[in-house]
Amino acid sequence: MPDPHRILDGLDPEQQRAVLASRGPVCVLAGAGTGKTRTITRRIAHLIDSGQVSPGHVLAVTFTTRAAGELRARLRALDISGPGASVQAQTFHAAALRQLRYFWPRGLTWELLDHKLPVVAHAARRVGVTTTSETLRDLASEIEWAKGSLIAPADYPARAAEAARDVPFGHDVVAAVFDGYEAAKRDGSHLLLDFDDLIIYAGEILREPDAASNFRARYRCFVVDEYQDITPVQQRLLDSWLGERDNLTVVGDANQTIYSFAGATAEYLLGFTRRFPDATLVRLQRDYRSTPEVVAVANQVIGAATERIPGTRLELIGQRDRGPAPRPAEFADDMREARGVVAQIKHLVNAGTPPAEIAVLYRVNAQSERFEEVLGEAGIPYQVRGAEAFFTRTEIVQAMHKLTDAAGRDDLPADSDAARVVRAVLAPLGLSTDEPVGPHAKARWESLRALMSVVDELLADEPGMSLRRLVSELTIRAEDRHTPERTGVTLASLHAAKGLEWDAVFLVGLTEGSVPIAQAIGHGPQAIEEERRLFYVGITRAREHLYLSWSLSRTGTGRVTRRRTRFLDGIDLDPRRSGRCSACGADLVSPESRVRGRCGSCRIEEHGDELLAALRTWRRDHAQERGVGELAVLTDAMLEAIADRRPADTESLAAIPGIGPVKLDQFGGEVLEVVRVRGSAGGG
């Protein structure tokens, strides 16, 4: 048994309060990095050590095998044991499977359906739906959402429309496939059960009095980790486990609710004290993971939510020593962003940060390609978490096979445009001008778009390249990608990063349409705020170094086509350092941005600033009088810097890069007069 005096060692006052709460309902609202796993495992140890419960009567559940494994490891380290049985720490599905195997009635047989797509395909064909592998996965995801949300096929169309579900077919069609899928799993007295059915049937079996009595005699104390991720069907199972009892501890953070698309809801966490009015409520807000600088940015981002979930006002309090300021950076295009990020990674590695303690996080998996390429060029090992490396993804392997076949044909005209041929080859695989419907179809589309970007880049470097040469270059890239090493830099989507942490985190691609993702922008404020919470999760993965970057265009054609994410608007990122944007603090990476003192996302627009408009008029007139080009007088960046800083004398005007003694002598007085007259009129 654990030493009772050691159970509280190293715990702060709030953690101790949660650990020592008496048997009964306890709700722990635990912010990122606040030691929730330590707290709940110590609570289990205290309940056992104080004789309030036996080890074999405790069932702790969470949502991933990794999290369940961590719970078991922590409990083993505490040396919690007892006669006959030990604490059970499992995922919901593992606990339900164990329960079904024990309580399943005789005369009715079942087996676990490991692969549901063939059954979904059969149901789809029965209703006349022609599908691809991606749309089949989208249909399967919809069925999972409906079952997790306790929605029957007949109710699906109305509920899906209300939730604005992103589906590849009409809601009635999906409902018909859903109904056919459920029917196909029933064959007389034999059933096929998918993973969602495990939860459903486990709850149904406990409607039988004997099964319920047996189970509740076995398990008398329940702990639920990551309670904000629970679905309605999982909550119903939990209620079946509890019965009329209330010996339940839940821990979660509504600010990390990022799986609403799969049916998860924070309502049960936030409504816990309404259901159990006598519950102990503890807030853990001391962040032991991240530096105060990282914590400050996280608090600002989540604090700016316009559709805040009620009861989520957890403000993290950094407990670590101070560290480096988070660094934002703006780049002209995607490749420059990738090279800039990898240059900074190399600097960190050379300074002693292990590659395994560095992560590059993005919104969609297709964004990994640039970083895989540049990390490979730099000889820095990496691993892609939660997805395959770019050139090993199914759709990219298929595309490379098709392109190789096309390049080997001898009936193409000698002057065939390689880019046009590639687009024609990729079109049947899913590359289209318009974004498709359905998350899996979109993921395939994003990957093919990324491959097309690589093609465009190669052709921009060498115009006129033949198709055969182009495919050869792509093949070399695919073959040169070294096998990722487990000790390398982690590349992962923001969703895949949940529950993990690193010394240094690079959040990349932070533009509107990516973060928040485009489909969320059209689905109202709740969808936007889930994207904000996802961004918050990414920020709170960083222990010490936090980098935030975005690019203004895809290919660097000189035309700005993107805007920095709204989630950084108004965020204080320490703009006082030289070489950083005076408005948002982003690193100024182009000569023009350094002159104006602002990044591209924070540029002054003429229609919004009278002084800038007046300066442009003055420059035009001055250039016409002297017969020179306008840019020979002052560049656009210089005018924007003048409008932003509003210099009152020659010395402050000369401080603007590019305005030297000659320009001061020629027209410095005129510029200062425009600033004096129109600057005050414009309400500086």
Image (cartoon, helix red, strand yellow):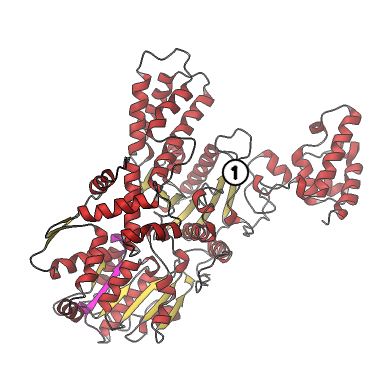
Q: Position of residue 167 (x, y in %)?
A: 40, 49
Name the residue furthest left: 107
Q: Give the image quarter of residue 62.
A: bottom left
Describe the element under mark 1 as helix, strand or loop: loop
Q: Which stretch is magenta? A: 53-67
* Left or right: 505, with 481 as reference point: right
Q: Nearer the viewer, residue 355 or 250?
A: 250
Q: Give the image quarter of residue 421.
A: top left
Task: Write the residue at 50% across / 53% down.
Answer: 520
Q: Is residue 62 magenta?
A: yes
Q: Position of residue 430 (x, y in %)?
A: 40, 36
Q: Residues within 10 Å of mark 1 (few under 14, many from 20)?
A: many
Would you say residue 489 is visible in this rendering?
A: no
Q: Amino acid at mark 1?
A: Arg
* Left or right: 190, with 658 as reference point: left
Quadrant location, the C terminus: bottom right
Q: Position of residue 231 (x, y in %)?
A: 35, 66
Location of mark 1 (residue)? 562
Q: Is residue 48 above or below residue 625?
A: below
Task: Write the residue at 19% across / 55% down.
Answer: 185
Quadrant location, the N terminus: bottom left
Q: Nearer the viewer, residue 326 or 410?
A: 410
Q: Is residue 315 above or below residue 409?
A: below
